Image (tube, grey):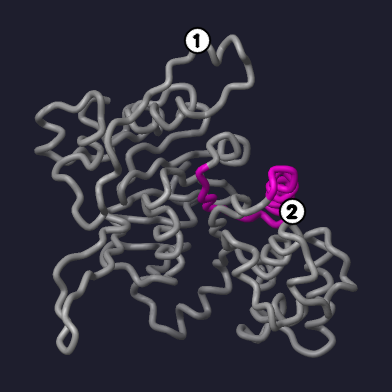
């Protein structure tokens, strides 16, 4: 795809959280490098999956792209506009076009607000509708996510987890966004409900022409819903490719280890498959190892891996890998 089809461009994105000490006078003694120089594009109408272990920086990356966290460094360009350079009022207007579906449907909905008030909040903030028009829009959104529009005066505790997540989806759609960050939207749900929510997201994408950044750790679900997949490790992007290319020909040792842990629904193939067990623990993002961040656990590591940081490079066909051995 060419640049005309790119909706979101992320260049060298960093988000470091300061570590401070002191009681009366606080001074910074270090930083947690949650996101440490991430670069990728998201094309219009596609779903880009962002995967990795817990604590690798996936959620922080998603929130920083939407400017819920202001970046330490780097660029986020949305439809030609540099979000980091925008002033508060300009950014507020731009936020109509970008929304987020949060991980926990029990924590992301205000228990003291009715469903009508929760879903209509973006309409009030951005002055998109009021009065009877607002009520009609809320009912339309509930129908869109397959909930009864007569539920508008109920409270979140009266709904199941799957229904609450649908309410979160309806709220995200209220301002007619083009881009939605889905932050592990199914991980807190029962397995029987997960497929329903994923199918709903796919249907909405087809109907409304949405673009998704889908953050998850369920690699089987990522292959089902995503067009391309990006793999993160300790704040860095280590691999990026089309889903079939990445799952069939993983080039980075970390990606190979992740995929070796995915169950295969074939007993014969499962018995023949070799698991890759990573040694040691994930280093702290406050004290990342020099060179390649993965070198302390990589079975293929050599001296250069601990001395020189590998750059994300194209090894053919849009398959990007950050590894000296790839």
Residue nearest the observer in this picture, 188 or 99: 188
Give the structural element (helix, strand or loop) at label 1.
helix
Left or right of 74 in this view: 289: left
Q: Earlier in the sequence, mark 2 or mark 1?
A: 2
Mark 2 or 1: in front is 1
Which residue is at 78% across, 68% downward?
141
Judge whether residue 202 is colored magenta: yes
Task: Examine the image and state in which quarter residue 195 appears.
Answer: top right
Q: Element under label 2?
A: helix
Would you identify the image quadrant in which residue 99 lies? Answer: bottom right
Q: Considering the image in quadrants, where does the C terminus appear?
A: top left
- Image check: 16 left or right of 76? left
Say whether residue 180 is magenta.
Answer: no
Image location of residue 325, percent across then percent down: 23, 25
Q: Is residue 96 above or below residue 49?
A: below
The spot of residue 306 in percent (x, y) is 13, 37
Residue linked to disc 2: 207
Residue range in magenta is: 190-217
From the image, tell me which residue sits under label 1: 272
| Residue neighbourhood size for the residue with mark 2, other residues' Cα within 10 Å, grouped as few (<14), some (14–19), many (≥20) | few
Residue 118 vs 200, above or below: the answer is below
| Residue 105, position as x, y percentages in the image | 64, 63
> How many residues crowd mark 1 within 10 Å: few (<14), some (14–19), many (20+)?
few
- Which image quadrant for residue 324? top left
At 50% from the left edge and 10% from the top edge, which residue is drawn? 272
**In the rendering, at what x and y percent does residue 223 appear?**
57, 35
Secondary structure character of the magenta stretch overall: helix
Residue at 46% x, 67% y: name it: 66
């Amino acid at each position: 795809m060419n640049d005309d089809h790119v909706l979101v461009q992320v260049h060298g994105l960093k988000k470091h959280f300061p570590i401070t000490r002191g009681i009366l006078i606080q001074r910074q003694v270090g930083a947690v490098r949650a996101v440490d120089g991430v670069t990728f594009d998201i094309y219009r109408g596609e779903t880009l999956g962002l995967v990795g272990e817990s604590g690798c920086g996936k959620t922080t990356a998603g929130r920083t792209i939407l400017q819920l966290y202001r970046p330490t460094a780097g660029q986020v360009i949305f439809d030609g506009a540099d979000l980091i350079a925008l002033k508060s009022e300009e950014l507020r207007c731009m936020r109509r076009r970008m929304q987020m579906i949060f991980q926990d449907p029990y924590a992301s909905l205000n228990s003291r607000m009715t469903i009508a008030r929760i879903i209509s909040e973006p309409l009030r903030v951005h002055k998109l509708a009021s009065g009877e028009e607002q009520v009609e829009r809320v009912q339309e959104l509930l129908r869109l996510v397959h909930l009864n529009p007569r539920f508008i005066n109920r409270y979140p505790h009266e709904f199941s987890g799957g229904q609450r997540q649908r309410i979160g989806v309806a709220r995200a759609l209220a301002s007619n966004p083009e881009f939605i960050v889905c932050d592990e939207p199914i991980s807190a749900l029962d397995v029987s409900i997960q497929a329903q929510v994923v199918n709903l997201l796919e249907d909405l994408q087809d109907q409304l022409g949405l673009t998704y950044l889908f953050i998850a750790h369920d690699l089987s679900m990522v292959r089902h819903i995503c067009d391309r997949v990006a793999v993160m490790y300790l704040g860095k992007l280590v691999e990026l490719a089309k889903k079939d290319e990445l799952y069939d020909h993983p080039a980075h040792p970390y990606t190979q280890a992740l995929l070796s842990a995915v169950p295969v629904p074939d007993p014969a193939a499962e018995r023949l498959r070799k698991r890759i067990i990573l040694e040691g623990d994930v280093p702290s993002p406050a004290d990342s190892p020099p060179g390649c961040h993965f070198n302390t656990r990589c079975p293929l590591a050599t001296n250069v891996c601990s001395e020189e940081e590998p750059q994300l490079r194209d090894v053919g066909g849009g398959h990007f890998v950050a590894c000296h051995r790839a």
